[in-house]
Each structure stands twice: as C-alpha cells, then as structure tokens.
Amino acid sequence: MRQTQLFTKTSKDNPSDEVSKNAQLLIRAGYIHKEMAGVYSILPLGYRVMEKIIGIVKQEMDAIGGIQMKTSAIQSKEVWEKTNRWSDDVVDNWFKTTLKNGTEVGLSFTNEEAYSNIVKNFVSSYKDLPLYPYDFKTIFRNETRSKSGIMRGREFYWKALYSFSADQEQHDLFYEKAKVAYSNVYKRVGLGDSTYMTFASGGTFSKYSHEFQTVSEAGEDLIYIDEAKGIAINKEVFTDDVLAELGIDKSTVIEKKAIEVGNIFSLGFKFSEPFELTYKTAEGTEVPVFMGSYGIGITRLMGTIVEVLSDEKGIVWPETVAPFKVHLLSLGDTAEQAESIYSQLLANGIEVLFDDRQGVSAGAKFADSDLLGIPHRVVVSDRSLAQGGLEYKQRTSTEATIVSVESLIQQLTA
Amino acid sequence: MRQTQLFTKTSKDNPSDEVSKNAQLLIRAGYIHKEMAGVYSILPLGYRVMEKIIGIVKQEMDAIGGIQMKTSAIQSKEVWEKTNRWSDDVVDNWFKTTLKNGTEVGLSFTNEEAYSNIVKNFVSSYKDLPLYPYDFKTIFRNETRSKSGIMRGREFYWKALYSFSADQEQHDLFYEKAKVAYSNVYKRVGLGDSTYMTFASGGTFSKYSHEFQTVSEAGEDLIYIDEAKGIAINKEVFTDDVLAELGIDKSTVIEKKAIEVGNIFSLGFKFSEPFELTYKTAEGTEVPVFMGSYGIGITRLMGTIVEVLSDEKGIVWPETVAPFKVHLLSLGDTAEQAESIYSQLLANGIEVLFDDRQGVSAGAKFADSDLLGIPHRVVVSDRSLAQGGLEYKQRTSTEATIVSVESLIQQLTA
C-alpha cells in the first residue's frame, strides 16, 4: 500500500490524556483513535495488526477442534438470572440499556451464560459431546477507571472458547491441548520469551486456573517465576502449600509485574447446572455437562506487544503481526526506481508499505518508519543506487547493508 | 466437516414466535439462535455463510479503493451533538447506556459522525483526498417492533463505507464506481436477477439516492420497475416529474414489494460542515470535504437470500455463499466408502459437510439436506455403489445422476 493512500499520519507529540505507553505509541503512529477513556477505534494500520492476531488465534483454536460462531452483544435478563449474574450488586461492570417496551437488556461482559443457553438446545446425548464453540466478539465492561490504553478497555475485542465435555476426564484432555494452543499463540505473536503459564486461583472444580502472564512493568498482576521450570505462580495463590505442591523452591523464584494475556479455566458444572445443560450417558443416566472457558483479549494482546517490544524510537512489531512486512522508503529524487522496486516486491507476494510521499525529508521518513515499527526497512536513495542497490535494515538492528533487489526478494521470501 | 462434529441440529417444527420465513428456516436449520425479538446469535453454519458474504463485500470494496478499519460501538454525546443527532427527540432508535461516572454514551446506530470525527484529524490538504474508509460492524437500533427475522434486527451486522472527496466531481467518479461494486455484490450472492438499482429520495446535495432493492413479498418497500431499463423507482419519489426526468413510461412499470439490501447516498457537506472537516485546495482556499455513504446490511442480505431463493423444502444457497459446497450423505452401511470419498473431496480442496451420522434414516438425511440448502448433494448408498458410483443431485434440480468420484471431483473443481 502507498503511504499517500493511507489516510492516517504520525504525530510527534504524545497525546496529553494518555499515560500508557501502548496508547501513546499507537495513537502517535496512527494505529488507533481515542473516542473516550477506554474506548478506541482501530484505524487501518491497527486493523491490519488485529487481523493478523485474529488469524493466528483462529488457526490455533481450529487446530484443537474449535468451531467459530458469533453470539449477540445484547443479552437478556432471564438468561443471566439463572446464574445470579444479572444484578449490578453481583456484577459491577455491566453496561445495560433498555428496549422501547421498557425491557432492560445487558451488553455482553463475558459469554458463559450465552453459550450455555445456546448449547443446551443441541445437546441431549453423550454422542453430542465434546463441543468447542468460540467467537471473536466486542465485549463491554463498565470499568470505573480506564488508563491502560487498549489493554483494559470499556469496549474491547476478544476471543472466547467454551468447552462442553462429558466428564472431567474428557475435559482434561482438551484442557491440556488448550494449554499448548495458548502457548503457541504467544510464541507466534512474539511474546514467547516473556510469557509464562501461571498458576492462579481455580474454582469449585479445580484447584487452579491457568493464566498466561507476560512480564511487563505495565502489568497489573504480580507473579513469581520459576525460570528453570518455565512456569509462574500468581501472587493470589503464592503460598507455601502451593509451592510445595508444584515442587518449586521459594528461593529460586523471581517476582515480576505481568500482564494477563490469556486465561483458561475449568468451570465444571457451575454453569451447566443452573442451565440444566445435561446429557444422557451411554448407560442412560442424565448428568450435567462439564465446562471450561478459554479467553484471549485480542486488543489487550496487541497493546501488550507494544508495551513489551517497543523501544525509544517507537513500535517494534514481530513479523507475524506487523501491518506490513516491508517499509519501502523513497528518498530524494528516486520515485521512478522506487516504483519499480515496489512493483517487484508486490509481484513476489510481499506486503509492502511504500513511503511514496514527495517533499518529506529523509529524517522525517526515518523517524516515521521507526515509529510505525514495520520489521524490514528498505531505502531507495541516490546513495544506495550509486552503491548498486537498496539500503536494507531490520527494525531491531542498527546496521544497514546494501543489497540488490534480487537478493532482498530472495531473503524476504525464503 | 463432519455433521457429528457440528453441534447444531435441525428441527421439524417452525418456531412458534417467528412469522418471517428467513427466521423460521434459519432457526429450523440451525443457522441462527434467537436471543430475543430482533436479536440473534449466529451459529456455526450461519457464521460460515456470513463469512462468505463478508468476503465478497470486502473484495468489492477493496477493488474500488476501500480501506478497512474498525470504529468503536460506544459513541460520545459531544460527537453526535455536532450534527444534532444525539437527542432522542431527533433520533428515535438510539440505544444509550451510562458510564460509572454518570456520563451517558450511545451505541452506534450509524457511522457518519464517527468517521467525520476521525477523518478530520488526518485531512488538511487536497493531497489527502479522496479517502474511502469502511468497516464491518455490529450496529444497534432500538426498533419498536422486530418481526422480520435477521432482516431488521435490534442488533445487526453491516458494512458501511464513507467517501471523502475534494469536490462533487471527484465524488461523482467514485459514486459511479460504487454503483458497479454494489451491483457486483448482488450478482455474486445470487440476487442479481431480482435486485434493482432504485431511485430514492436524495438530500440537499443530490436529487436522488440509490437503493438496491430485491423483489420479495417480504419487502417493506414498494418499487416501480422498468424491466427494459433494468432500474426501479421507490414509491417515495414515484412522481410524473421523476418519470419524465428518467425517461420512463408510467404504463410500462411494474409495482413490486422489495427489500432494501443496500443504499448509496451523496452526503455533500451535511457532516463535513458541522465537524469543520475542511481541507486546503491547491489554490490555498479552505473548503469542506464532500462526503458520501455506502451501506450494506450483511445479516439482512443473508436473510434476503433465504426469503428469495428458498423453496418448500428449505433453504437454497447459491454456491458463492453456501456454508459448504457439497453435502455428502452416507446411507445404510456405507461408512467406509463414504469416508474414502470424503477424504478425496477434501484433498481436492472442496468444502464438504459430511453427514456421517449412524442410525439416521435415509428419509431424515434427505430432508435435512434439503432444509440446509447446500448446493451439491452427493449420496453414497448400497444402490449407488452397485451402479458404480455416487448419486449426485443439485439442490435446485429434481434429477439425480450416478457419477464416479473422479468425474464428480472434475466437475466440482472445474
């Protein structure tokens, strides 16, 4: 895409009303637009990143048997009263609104009830199980304060999968697969090294839930990491008993602030019982379905990547989620040569943002490129052409080299 | 996909609380789940249809220069007060809700204000124009009554593109392209023969807007069709003056009920002026941006396809939007052979729903297949195998033929 056709522009100054690094950088670089505290529109560059993250999460969910659908945002009182989660005294972050006929309705802040209520219509026999429906969805939470940019929105985008299993044994098999799928997601979006599967408090049906926590000073959680084992314990369950149970020596753990980027949870019968979501076993007994929940905040994950990987010059996107693979900069009087290189890169299926702006200084183009954070920078200048090619530099590197178009294409498509 | 893994099931009886054909069929076939009047969750089969429609609309929008983004659902009072559309006295279908701090916010019922407010930040020169941002989005409208299934939801999914042009001339060029893109969409989703570009009332800046109306008894509009010209006039502007201007003879038009499946509109300065969305011309004058809007209801389009193309046996999906291309039915004791055919079809990149259910009668499988409406039905039975192959029938045909796997694959991948 040509930068002259991309309608957003960068800004030199941090927005005065943002304290989080992710919001500051994403707004300055033109990835998002702030509507109000905790509510952001995603601009074209940001949407490309979101789509890539969604694509990765979707692949991993489909690979473990997930089946995609789309639940409504508007939710009815009757459904949520079954689990006693309708009342604002119980759930303090509902957004509610009213139909013309006076009926009060809610906007999804989570999805267990919606899924239990739907799946109930289609499950009657053990042959119908297990099931792994999921969706990507806008979620609404009436947060009192919202200062963490797209990491904690009043409106945000997430993926939630719910598992419906015949019994705990069937559930546990899937739960282990979900752990692997989740780890794959964080590896693939570039957070593998800084993300730990973290033991957190469970519920009635299992001792622990598992959070995925990415180490960051911007995090709201405290975790205790055992580097050798590659796991962590959330402060909320960091007790001598738990340490003993997990075989972790208190003297070896490191305390870190971390961002919760995902969460998997055994729900057991907590929702199936109130919804009378039961099935008939092979022996003909009517028993409740065993459920689990598996969530990832897509916009939070995007914000976390910015928090963790950016540097003093701007955003640093891993290639897997970058809006474009290559940022092609035409400097000085090189429009013609740059156009030809742009065409060749596109012809080879490479996603390119082409800074074809005229009358913008080299310094400004370099600064924009660093701020936007596209992984591979390719500069066409009189100097590079005199040296027989293009100046190539990775966003994460300080060294530039002169390469020919052919070798660049070979390297980028390898 | 195996039907045993698809968690939805068909139902023989129409839901008692639905009067529209689209809702009745889509609920019976397991494409959608009713949350309340005008609010539906989209089940896995329905989601596959929605994704295909979205894919077609996205292609057509990208082809005319559209650039995708994602605006927020939550909208602020200040933004909508600029055009005097915040008040419930002016707009009677707002859903509003309240932040913890008491601030009233709205849920998007349309998007002109949101886009004007965002684009304003990035446009200053004629060089920044034209721009064609769009998004797919859940839209909320507080309808008093909602009896048309997914054709008129209190919550629905749409695509809206807004054009930002330097002047009417630049605008008109795009507007003509949009007409073609819209016509392409209806052709591609199988409604080309029954959908007419329809002259409807314009606004301050142009005499007409253009609706795309699909002929159907379920429609809420009355249109007058000139078959020879392939265009129509909405009742709201069906006057002798308009007929004369369009060169249409009143005696040749046919009155029909129709469903509005899309709408393109020249907005002129209606939104750019209140938002002070202006730019500097090449001559240095500050003038307002000329805008246009281009909407398609994705869920409404899906409902319209069901209304128009279904028959007494069930839904009839055009191949371009069908959840699967082939419905493979294994009858009697043919599981082994059917598994092999299923593998071969998948290996050739064909999307197959495989009815691998055991203990379900042939009659029930045929009835389900007709209800689901997948375009190509392939039956593996003892009889078909004895005749040397598979029984093949199109959903729209009454004649079945015996074909070999090889010739079937050849035909489906041609």
Image: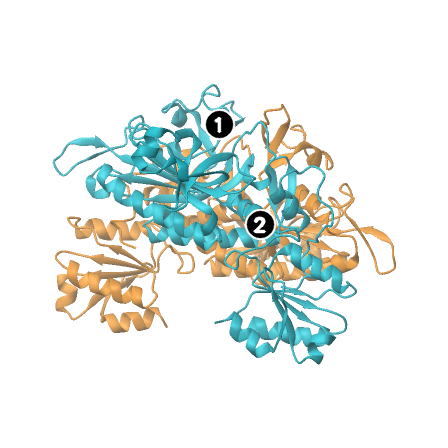
Chain colours: A cyan, B orange
> Label 2, on which residue?
B135
Under mark 1, the amino acid is Val
- Left/right placement of residue B309 relative to residue A129 reads right
Spatial CA distance of label 1 from label 2 is 26 Å
Subunit under mark 2? B
Query: Which residue, as the protein is rendered here, is positioned at the far front?
Result: A251
Residue A179: give x, y in percent of width and height: 35, 45
Neighbour tally class for label 1: few under 14, some 14-19, many 20 plus, Cα within 10 Å:
some
Q: Is residue B379 above or below residue A283?
A: below
Residues A414 and B179: in front is: A414
Residue in view at x 50 percent, y 55 percent: A52
Q: Is residue B386 above or below residue B296?
A: below
Which label belongs to residue A105? 1
Residue A192: give x, y in percent of width and height: 45, 51
Q: Quadrant of residue A263?
A: top left
Q: Is residue B373 visible?
A: yes
Under mark 2, the amino acid is Asp
Q: Quadrant of the C terminus of chain B?
A: bottom left
